Image (cartoon, rainbow, N blue to C red):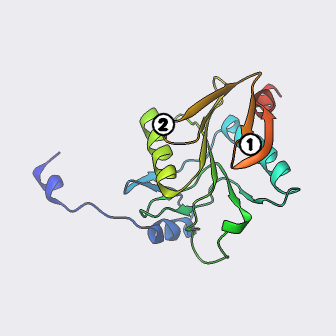
Amino acid sequence: MTIQEQTQPRTRYTAQNIYEFSLQGQHYELLNGELFEMTPAKQDHGAVANMFAYWLTAFVIPNKLGVVYAAETGFTLPNGDVLAPDVSFTRKERIQPEGVGFSTVAPDLVVEVDSPSNTKIGMQEKVDAYFAAGVRQVWLVYHRPRKVYRYTSPTQVTIYQNGDWLDGGDVLPGFHVQVNDLFSVLDA
């Protein structure tokens, strides 16, 4: 890094910048003040994320619990970060009225499917950011080797794999699905 690069002020991005970029077809997340481009998902990633959305929606809608959001739904966190989880759920009493821009209400549950561009440190930073914003559960999904890491705090994690039943805990009481079913789309 040159002295000139060290002395130039770093660009500070905001939720408004991220929203304006999205209107131009550019998709980013903002984590710890750093801009991350969101590249299109590969087919396994998209298929697995869709299975989680399918099972969650099939439980949430008939029970009138709230809304399950698809990928790229942006949430502005209290610290100004903007994240767009692969799937998320917000209880009906917490849903923000429709407005311009991203929701400023953190979801109750977030599902993030691992992709080649993710690092373990980056995924842990997201977990930390979500919990700091008020998210109550984070599911990190690793489609290779077909495991789900369910976080109930930044340091409390339970690992689920084929043969196990994943449940919604106190965020979605009564929700349960066999892990095999979540990954069955990879066997198609």
Q: Residue at x 80, y 46 (%)?
A: 54
Residue drawn at the location 50% of the way across and 38% of the way down:
117
The answer to whether residue 87 is visible is yes
- Looking at the image, which is closer to me, 8 or 168? 168
- The correct choice, above or below, for 106 with respect to 119 in the image is below
Give the mark toward the camera: 1 or 2.
2
Nearer to us in this view, 64 or 179? 64
Q: Is residue 140 left or right of residue 120?
A: right
Residue assigned mark 2: 155
Most distant residue in the left direction: 3
Q: Is residue 168 left or right of residue 136?
A: right
Residue 96 place in picture, x, y as percent: 64, 72
Tell me the residue that label 1 is attached to: 52
Q: Residues within 10 Å of mark 2 (few under 14, many from 20)?
A: few
Residue located 49% across and 61% down the image: 77
**What secondary structure is found at the residue carrying circle 2?**
loop
Q: Amino acid at mark 1?
A: Phe
